[in-house]
C-alpha cells in the first residue's frame, strides 16, 4: 500500500498522527512527515487516518504515487 499526502492541502490538524503514529509524524507545529510505503500491519490505521483527515489530503492505494 502506498500513500501520498497533498502537503499544500494539509493544515496540520494531525488526526493522521493520532490514528497512525507509525506512519505519520508531526515535526514542529505544521510539518508533516510520513512513510509513503505503509508497513505491514498499519493498513487499517492508515485507512482510518485518511478518512479522518478534515481536508482529505491523504490519498491511499496500491499505486497512489503512480500519477
Image (cartoon, rainbow, N blue to C red):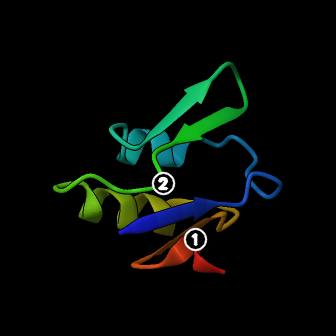
For the C terminus, give its image quadrant.
bottom right
Query: What's the mark number on residue 55?
Result: none
Position above or below: 27 against 17 = above
Q: Which mark is residue 65?
A: 1
Q: Residues within 10 Å of mark 1 (few under 14, many from 20)?
A: some
Q: Residues within 10 Å of mark 2 (few under 14, many from 20)?
A: some
State left or right for residue 30 relative to residue 16: right
Q: Are marks 2 and 1 in contact (CB under 8 Å)?
A: yes
Q: Quadrant of residue 21?
A: top left
Residue placed most toward the observer, 45 or 4: 4
At a point 76% along the width and 47% down the height, the residue shown is 11
Disc 2/disc 1 C-alpha distance (Å): 8 Å
Which residue lies at the image location 58% right of the left edge and 37% below the top edge? 33
Residue at the image point whose x is 69% and y is 40% from the top = 12
Question: Residue 29: percent from the left, percent from the top?
Answer: 71, 23
Residue occupying the far right of the picture: 8
- Residue 25: give x, y in percent of width and height: 50, 33
Any mark on residue 36, and which? 2
Picture coordinates of residue 23 (x, y %)? 39, 44
How many numbered circles does the render carry?
2
Image quarter of residue 18: top left
Q: Secondary structure at mark 1?
A: helix
Q: Residue placed at 48% from the left, 54% from the top?
A: 36
Amino acid at each position: 500500500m502506498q500513500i501520498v499526502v497533498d502537503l499544500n492541502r494539509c493544515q496540520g490538524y494531525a488526526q493522521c498522527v493520532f490514528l497512525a503514529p507509525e506512519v505519520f509524524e508531526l515535526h514542529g507545529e505544521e510539518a508533516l512527515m510520513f512513510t509513503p510505503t505503509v508497513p505491514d500491519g498499519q493498513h487499517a490505521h492508515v485507512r482510518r487516518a485518511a478518512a479522518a483527515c478534515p481536508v482529505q489530503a491523504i490519498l491511499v492505494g496500491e499505486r497512489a504515487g503512480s500519477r
